[in-house]
Structure formats: C-alpha cells, structure tokens
Amino acid sequence: MANAWKIARKSNAQLPLVIVIALAVVLVLLGKAQSGLFDQARMRVTDWMAPVLMKVRAPVQGFDRWMGSVSEIFSVYEQNLKLKEENARLRQWRNVAIVLQGRVGRYQTLLHAVPAPQLNAVLARVIGRASRPFLQTMVLDAGRGNQVLPGEAVVDARGMIGRIYLAGQRTSWVILLTDINSRIPVTVAPSSAKSAAGMAQGNIQAMMTGDNTGQPALEMVSRLVTLHAGDQVVSSGDGGLLPPGLPIGTVVPDGHDGWRVSLLADPASSQDVEVLNFSKPPEPLPPTAQLPAEAAGLKPMEPPPPPVTAAPTAPAPVAAKPKPVAAAPEAASGEDVDR
Amino acid sequence: MATLERPGTSGSLKFLTALVPLFCGLLCAFLSNIPVSLLGGVVPPPLLALVPVYYWCLVRPDLMTPAAALTVGFAEDVLSGGPPGVWTLAFVLTYALVARQRDSFAGLSGLAAVLGFAAAALVACATAWLTVAALHGHLPPLAPILGELAMTVLFYIPTAYVIGLLHHRLVGASRGDI
C-alpha cells in the first residue's frame, strides 16, 4: 500500500494544529456548558432526514426480523414449551387481577378517591435507532408539531422505554433508560409476601441509572433496605417530570452486592410507542358533597345568609349548594361507610 | 506547496478537487450516523469518518488540514448525538499523532497498514472514552467503545479501497513533495 501512496513529506501545519487542538478543547467545554447549541443542529438534521428514514425503515425492519428468525430457529421448541407454561401462569394471574381491579374500584367509590390525572398520549413510530458508545437512542416520527416535548415519557405495550431528549418539528430523539445519561427516580415495590416482610418500611425509593449496559443499575436512597430479586420497579413520579406508577422492570442481582433492573420493554424491537404528555395539573377542589364529612352522612353546615341591602341593583350572589353525587346513595349510607 | 497540475484542469475544478477529502470525511460521518441499527443494535456502527482523515493525512496533508479534521470531527459530534466536542477532540489529536509519525505510518503495507490504522483508531477511541469519563465524572463501560473500535478497523479495508480509488481518480498526488 505504501507504494501506491505517494506521500507529501512536509506539511506546514504545525501552528494551525496547536490552535485547532485548543479549539477542540474549547468545543468540549462549550458543549458541556451550552449543549443546546448542538441540539438545535442535531434536530434540524434529523428533521431533514426523516423522509429517508421512513423509506428505509421497512427493509431494515425486514432484515432485522430475518436475522432474528435465523438465530431463533434452533430454540423454537424450547421457547414454545416455556411460553405455554408462562401463558397458563399468566391466565391465573389475569383472573386474580380482574378480581382485585373490581375490589379496588369499589374501595375508590367508597372513599371518593381522587382519580389519577388523565395522560394524553401521542402514538409515534420508531424510524431510527442508534447504539453509539456514548449514546443509546431511537428516533420517533413525532415532534413538536404533534405536541411532543422534551422530558416526556416514552412507553411501549410492555413498559417504559425512555424519555424524549430532543424534539424537532417532525421528529424527536428518545434517550433510552439504558443510556449513560439516563437517571430516573423509581419506586421498588415488593413482589411477594416474603419481600413485603423484608420491606418493613413499605415501598423503597431509588434512583435508576443507565450505564450503556442492558440492565440499568439501582442506587438506593437508603442503604438500610433489603431488596429481593423479582421486586417490581415503577416510576416514582418524584420531581413531577414523569407520571408515577409506569411499569419499568424487575429487580435482579448484579453479582457484586448490588442490584440492577431487568427492563420489561425491549427498545431494540419496539416499533410503535406512546409518548405520554404528563403535565401534572393542579387537583381541583372536590365538591362539598364529596368531602369526608358528607360522605360519612353528616350534614354540612349551612352557609351564612347574604347581607340584606336596601336596594339591590344586582342579583345577590348565590351560595354554592352541595351538588348531588351519582354514587351518593351508596357511599353516604352508614352501612357502607362502617363496613 | 505546489500541487499537481493536470492538463485541462481549470481553477474552479482544482478548488473542487481540493475539497474532495473534506467532503469524503463529511459523507462518511453522515453515512455512519444514519440512525438505522442492523442486528438489533448489538453491533455498533463503525467510525467511518476517521478513515478519510487518516488516509489523506498521510497522502495529502495539504488537503486534509487540521481544520478539515476539526470539521469532520465536529460533524461526527453533531450527527452522533453524543456529548459535544468529544469526537472533535479525538479526531484532532489522532490527526496530530498521525501527522507527527507520517513516515512510519505511510511506510506500512498489507496487514501492517491495517494495524497502523488500528493504532490510530485506538488513539481516537481512547481519547473519546477518557473525555467522556472526565465529563461524566466516572468511567463509562469499555465494551461499547471496544466494539466500535473493532468495527472501525473491520470497515477500514473496504472504505480505504474506495477512498484510494477516489484519490487516484480525482485528487492525485502532490507533485512538489513526492
């Protein structure tokens, strides 16, 4: 190869080289301080590439599926047996879940529980993925034009995948939970009675940090807690950025006295995802009839009568009367409350 | 530095040919950063943009200048989505090393030439890895960057072949320095 290369022996570039190295260092520092400058450029490029990515999506997806089928063809029988067993187990759990869901619904009616805030979701399609050494991301075909904003949670049918990192006009980048820059406050809930007994203090708050491996690490807020393999990990909602209770994964030991999270979602195979628009609205004050005193069957105090004026020019303000509640007969009955 | 004057080449054409190394670097950065992940993201994409920087730094340093290496590294940064400036610094430092040891690198042939590029790619990846470690305050995992290094070296042979063709057909050698 050396014969083919006729090289230049001298280059008068020593001085620019020093300046260029200094410029590169400045760029690193500037990027650390003002990363938004780079993000704008990235989003413009991705928006511009979006039509091309949508075109190449189908063949790439087909190739991925074909490669996956080649590698899995040798384990089809074992997987089939395992899936049948898992399916039978899940059917049992489904029945339990239906019963519990009904019971929770009745309790909520009895207690007049404030319902969880509604989440607006934007359905988006994955049009690109990148697994770089310092960034694991996917590109969605929805951006600010579809009300997708940075910080919003991205979930698929199985659980949370990540958060919106950059949002352009037509596309957005998702930072995956496994990425080195990802930090999510989570709640670890016991998965069994044995775990619950170990967690005398109830659910455990922790921080889930990605490190570019397949299973993010769990950093405990408290060092005195005990976890068990299989405990459920959900988003805690601390900080108000993410909705609480999003399923994330299960706890697994890392083999070095630490714990990691085996994610429910698989970003490598997700094709359609939902971007959850969670902006925690201020909780509205419940009507008077829903206050605990009213629910307990006690009569609320009558509001004071309006002051009498000699010649009212405008109609007097009408005092708010308690509104009847649909479930009031059931909830207000003493029998139900005492139960 | 005098450059080879081909018969019939006009000034504007000469100017365009001089930009071929830079355009190749930018094109390679674009191609390697298209967010399409084959094999489920198990295999990282190669650092294709390093190949033209390395090649023309050896062959035509008057065309692949430090500023051109900086531009290609910056493009890699913007397109890859990682921490800004990391690949810019890595490319510029690798360029500095290769330019300093140009005679040693250019004298290699065959498998040794591939190993020479592997050494340069190792410098680039190590620089990027250490920069990210400094920015984040802890060491990032080694496996992804080693995977990228392996893929870059693997893709060096076909990429260098294509770049060699472009060089001989469009750019040509520097007459005054041969």
Image (spheres, coloured by chain):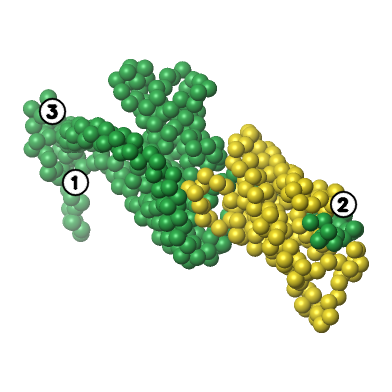
Chain colours: A green, B yellow
Residue A44 percent coordinates (x, y): 55, 62
Q: CA distance from mark 2 to mark 1?
A: 90 Å
Residue ID for mark 3: A337
Residue ID for mark 1: A320
Foreground mark, 3 or 2, reads 2
Residue displayed at 79% across by 56% down:
A1
Q: CA distance from mark 3 to mark 2?
A: 90 Å
Q: Are marks 3 and 1 on the same chain?
A: yes
What amino acid does circle 1 point to? Answer: Ala
When the figure is inspected, residue A24 is found, relative to residue B23, above or below; the finding is above
Q: CA distance from mark 3 to mark 1?
A: 26 Å
- Depth check, front residue: B36 or A184: B36
Label 1 crowding class (10 Å Cα cut-off): few <14, some 14-19, many 20+?
A: few
Label 2 crowding class (10 Å Cα cut-off): few <14, some 14-19, many 20+?
A: some
What amino acid does circle 2 point to? Answer: Asp
Residue A190 percent coordinates (x, y): 34, 25
The local secondary structure at tag 3 comes to helix
On what subunit does the disc labeled 3 rest? A
On what subunit does the disc labeled 1 rest? A
Dot 3 or dot 1: first in sequence order is 1
Residue ID for mark 2: B103
What amino acid does circle 3 point to? Answer: Val
